[in-house]
Amino acid sequence: MNYIELNDKGKLGSDEQKLADYFGVGNYTTFYKKHFIQNRFSITKDDFIAGVIPVMFSAMKKLGIEYKHDDYPEQLRKYLYRKIWETKLGYIKDKVFNEYLINPIFIKPKDKLKKFTGFLLNSRDDWFLTDGAADGTNIICSEPVKWVTEYRIPVINKIPRDYCNYFGNPNIQVDKSVVQNMIDDWADSPKAYCLDVGVLDTGETALIEINDAFSCGSYSMSAETYGDLLTTRWNELKG
């Protein structure tokens, strides 16, 4: 069975509608997050499920799927064009509130269940954007850079299926030869993932981050590409 999550208003979101179109009428069942979390229905490894990240991690736990992910695979770090490092949120909090933070930094959670959305931290006035995350939260920091355009590239079986502009100037294109080099260099990549890539104000085509394909935004992907992306990754995770 193919299960697709409904939003709180009892409707399919735009991403979920693409999956409904992909499977076709009569070939999927909808559900609410609370019903799944409350175990009102069960899934098996023969099933497909699409929902928000907490739902997907709950599904993995129920099916005994071990999961790991790296936003910045070691083989692709040469394409970052910026310094990144890992630390605890409390360490950065101490620097900010004691005015030790000399330059702005971009921070985002490293944990599977994202505690807050990544943002550029300039001063203590921005701290509310951490959304009350605990001091022990693992975070990734990076030097700030200026993106002039950003794209999401769904990659399935080493083939880039689309180039979806979601920020900046859509008339500026990423260097597709560099994108192909990224795909080739990540030899042990999943069968399906999203390669987020942009162009810096210095002109380089650089890696923004890797997003797993089991729960990701579709942007301008077709229903066919989006469905292929999620089903390929889910089948891989199930083994």
Image (spheres, rainbow, N blue to C red):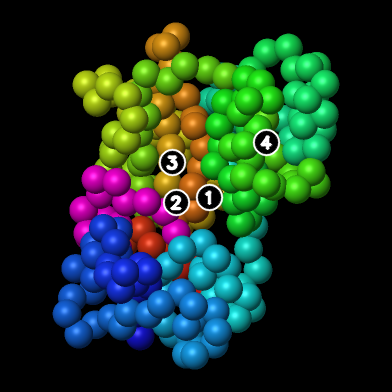
Q: Is residue 41 magenta?
A: no
Look at mark 1 in the image and give the residue it sits on: 189
Q: Quadrant of the N terminus?
A: bottom left
Disc 4 versus disc 3: distance between alpha carbons? 18 Å
Relative to 55, say whether 102 is above or below: above
The type of residue carrying mark 1 is Ser
Q: Mark 3 and mark 2 in contact (Cβ < 8 Å)?
A: yes
Q: Mark 4 and mark 2 in contact (Cβ < 8 Å)?
A: no
Closer to us: 70 or 109: 109
Query: How dense is the environment of label 2, judged by Cα within 10 Å: few (below 14), some, or many (20 and up)?
Result: many
Look at mark 2 in the image and give the residue it sits on: 193
- Residue most toward the top? 202
State the SS at label 1. loop
Disc 2 versus disc 3: distance between alpha carbons? 6 Å
State the SS at label 2. strand
Q: Mark 1 and mark 2 in contact (Cβ < 8 Å)?
A: yes
Relative to 193, say whether 162 is above or below: above
Q: Residue 227, image x and y in percent?
A: 30, 63
Q: Residue at x 24, y 62 (%)?
A: 18
